[in-house]
Image (cartoon, rainbow, N blue to C red):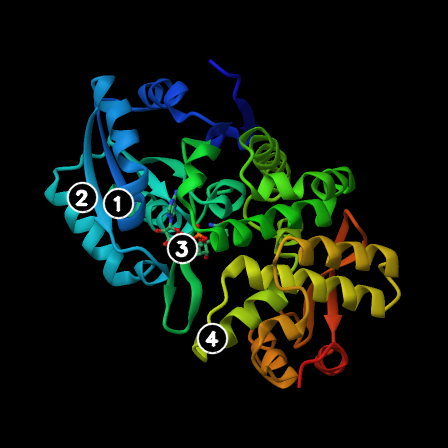
Amino acid sequence: MKKYKDINIDLKDRSYKILINDNIGDILFNVVSKIITRPKVFIITDENVAVFVLPTIRKILDDGGIETQVVIIPSGEKSKSFSQLENLIKELLNLKIERQDTLIALGGGVIGDLVGFTASIIFRGIDFIQIPTTLLSQVDSSVGGKTAINMGEGKNLVGTFYQPKAVIADVSLLSTLPHKEIISGYAEVIKYAVLGNKAFFEWLKVSQKELLDLNTDLLVEAVATSCKMKAQIVEKDEYENGSRALLNLGHTFGHAIENKMNNNGSKILHGEAVGLGMCLSAQFSNKINLCSADDTNQIIALIEDAGIPSHYSDLKVELKAIEITDILSKDKKRKDDKNTLILLNGIGEAFIKNGIEDNVINDFLISVGFK
Ligand SMILES: NC(=O)c1ccc[n+]([C@@H]2O[C@H](COP(=O)([O-])OP(=O)(O)OC[C@H]3O[C@@H](n4cnc5c(N)ncnc54)[C@H](O)[C@@H]3O)[C@@H](O)[C@H]2O)c1
């Protein structure tokens, strides 16, 4: 059996392990059997993952004598809704789920967020395990315990902090994921390097091509380094009262662009918007004399080489600066009617900057091409 990477996330009685390898069959049964209290689990997955991954997972558990009940929900962001939450809970109750049972979230961030939220409220909280199947969920959403559903008024507005009992990430499961989704998840990998790990940034520069070709040894390394960094940040600030906000690097601009584009019908994936958001954060930092031109250019070059939008012109639609600042004016991180951004002193040196005026951001956006 090939060695797996094993990261402990230390949160007192909510601590758990993140296990990363390229063959889930080597570890799944052992991890699950240590957590469950009776030989039965409830797997919740989406329509795509049910085709590509579910049969493997079921067989491993069936072979080990663990019964699997499965609920399949529609794929896509629309499943992070109150109505889907209600349907899921009703299905679980019809399947006679009990308080001691364990849910398995098998899928990307949509499944992880919805199942995590369900686990946190059904019977006032039951155990759940994350088996992330997208790169984004392996490096980001499955770790750290944020669960959520969306409202018409905005994304992730209803949710809980609720940690899983284990995270099992098999990078070989990414082989069926569309390339666009790989790129989107990879933007979050770059985020960890840019926000706090210069050596990782240098490693990505030489490993990027093979990583995007899904070299599994390199993927295990990249997922493990990303999870280790997320674990350290979450350990210091589980409930996001301070430094956990560093994980939002690229997300303030990114969310505004994502929100605007997805509302006007010109689709952009979350990670693509975050990639452009990181470039904008670096350029903004450079403009106010924080990040050097060389570091700024290196960040933009890495993102551009990965095929992630790095300039306004990559969006191929017209966005107005005022539309972006208007969305930022409703951002949850806003304080005293001024903006908070995650900025950079250089590669690997992110920090939280409060008190940025709307007009400063507006002028900056116009200077990089926004209308
Ligand atoms: N909780 C957190 O901390 C956190 C962090 C970041 C993002 N998120 C959330 O994560 C969600 C995005 O997650 P995502 O990018 O994983 O999207 P997703 O869950 O929608 O998955 C993307 C697509 O890939 C498909 N898919 C998943 N695994 C596959 C596989 N192995 N092979 C083939 N197809 C597969 C899915 O069916 C879906 O169509 C958003 O809702 C976002 O808000 C949460």
Residue wearing tag 3: 148
Give coordinates of residue 269: x percent, y percent.
Answer: 49, 62
The verdict on label 4 being within 8 Å of ligand 1 is no
> Is 282 left, or right, of 290 in this rendering?
left
Do the numbered discs 2 and 1 sit on residues whose CB atoms are within 8 Å?
yes
The verdict on label 2 being within 8 Å of ligand 1 is no
SS for dot 2: helix
Question: Hey, which quadrant is residue 232 in on the image?
Answer: top right
Residue wearing tag 2: 92
First in residue order: circle 2 vs circle 1: 2
Do the numbered discs 1 and 4 sit on residues whose CB atoms are within 8 Å?
no
Residue wearing tag 4: 266
Residue wearing tag 1: 122
At label 4, counting other C-alpha atoms closer than 10 Å, the crowd grade (few under 14, some 14-19, many 20 or more) is: few
Foreground mark, 1 or 4, reads: 4
Distance between mark 2 and mark 3 Cα atoms: 19 Å
At label 3, counting other C-alpha atoms closer than 10 Å, the crowd grade (few under 14, some 14-19, many 20 or more) is: many
The verdict on label 3 being within 8 Å of ligand 1 is yes
